[in-house]
Image: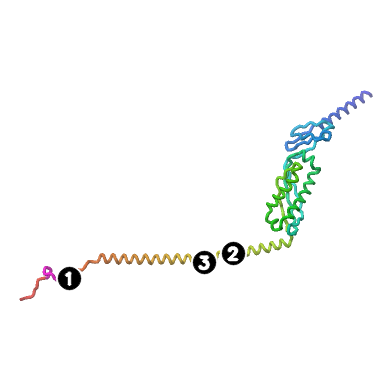
């Protein structure tokens, strides 16, 4: 009986030691860090690889260093000119200081979501509706800067912010559709008038070129006729002078009988 109790006691001790040993060994992945607390005091971060913790005294908190993406659901915001619009966006962040992420904020996910929502409303509240619809890239940059200023003290870097969809009020959508239709009609009229003007210019230019070519042809024809007449006059034989006609040397002998 005593031997049985002794064996049971030894088994319990060995099992307890194994449990403590397994709890003291942590395997940290390459993309993770383990923030270690010893008796409630942060002693730094460990990893990657095998990390040994002192049983009962040490406690580890895992922090993922990979870039994360979070979606902010559709929010209704009021623009500077009092137009309600619905916006949703996604933002990307990365932990750069694991210790701050654990020590400076209790629930980073919840804090980041509420902070992103309030930042979105603050940014949209200072921009007119037309600029919200046309300057999406500038709004993304403003949101990223504002979010990064807040999350920096949490050891988090906001890498990118992208607005996915902006839904203006129905009245604004109808006005935009009418404006788009009017713009298309205007472009069609301008294109048609431009084509008509260019066609008229081409016709006038063709007539001008035809007139010039005809005048050039008439000029060349006149020049050729004049040159031909000049050559004919040069080639015609010259008439004998009258003084040679009455000369005795050239006079024929008279056949009159005496």
Marks 1/2: CA–CA distance: 84 Å
Say if mark 2 contacts mark 3, CB within 8 Å.
no
Q: Main secondary structure of the magenta part?
A: loop
On screen, residue 192 versus residue 93, left or right, reads left
What residue is shown with label 2?
190
Check the image and tell me how it is coloured.
rainbow
> Which quadrant is home to the N terminus?
top right
Depth order, front residue of 93/144: 144
Q: Position of residue 205 (x, y in %)?
A: 48, 65
What residue is shown with label 3?
200
> Which quadrant is home to the C terminus?
bottom left
**Around disc 3, counting alpha carbons within 10 Å, would you say few (fewer than 14), some (14 to 19), or many (20 or more)?**
few
Residue at x 8%, y 75% (from the top left corner): 256
Q: Position of residue 192 (x, y in %)?
A: 58, 65
Q: Position of residue 46 (x, y in %)?
A: 76, 34
How many numbered callouts? 3
Marks 3/1: CA–CA distance: 69 Å
Specify the quadrant of the image occupied by residue 63: top right
Find the residue positioned furthest to the top.
Answer: 3
What residue is shown with label 1?
242
What's drawn in magenta, residue-wise?
241-251
């Amino acid at each position: 009986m005593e031997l049985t109790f002794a064996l049971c006691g030894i088994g319990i001790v060995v099992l307890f030691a194994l449990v403590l040993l397994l709890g003291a060994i942590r395997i940290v992945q390459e993309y993770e860090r383990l923030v270690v607390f010893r008796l409630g005091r942060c002693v730094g971060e460990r990893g990657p690889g095998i990390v040994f913790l002192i049983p009962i005294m040490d406690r580890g908190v895992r922090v993922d260093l990979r870039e994360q993406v979070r979606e902010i659901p559709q929010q209704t915001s009021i623009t500077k000119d009092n137009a309600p619009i619905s916006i949703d966006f996604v933002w990307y962040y990365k932990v750069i200081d694991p210790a701050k992420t654990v020590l400076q904020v209790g629930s980073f996910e919840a804090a980041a979501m509420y902070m992103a929502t309030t930042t979105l409303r603050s940014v949209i509240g200072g921009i007119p509706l037309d600029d919200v619809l046309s300057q999406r890239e500038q709004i993304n940059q403003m949101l990223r800067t504002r979010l990064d200023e807040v999350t920096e003290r949490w050891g988090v870097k906001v890498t990118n912010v992208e607005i996915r969809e902006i839904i203006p009020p129905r009245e604004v959508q109808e006005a935009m559709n009418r404006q788009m239709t009017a713009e298309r009609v205007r472009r069609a009229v301008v294109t048609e008038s431009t084509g008509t003007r260019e066609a008229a210019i081409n016709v006038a230019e063709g007539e001008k070129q035809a007139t010039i070519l005809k005048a050039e042809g008439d000029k060349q024809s006149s020049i050729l006729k004049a040159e031909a007449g000049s050559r004919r006059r040069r080639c015609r034989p010259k008439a004998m002078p009258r003084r040679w006609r009455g000369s005795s040397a050239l006079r024929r002998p008279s056949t009159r009988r005496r």
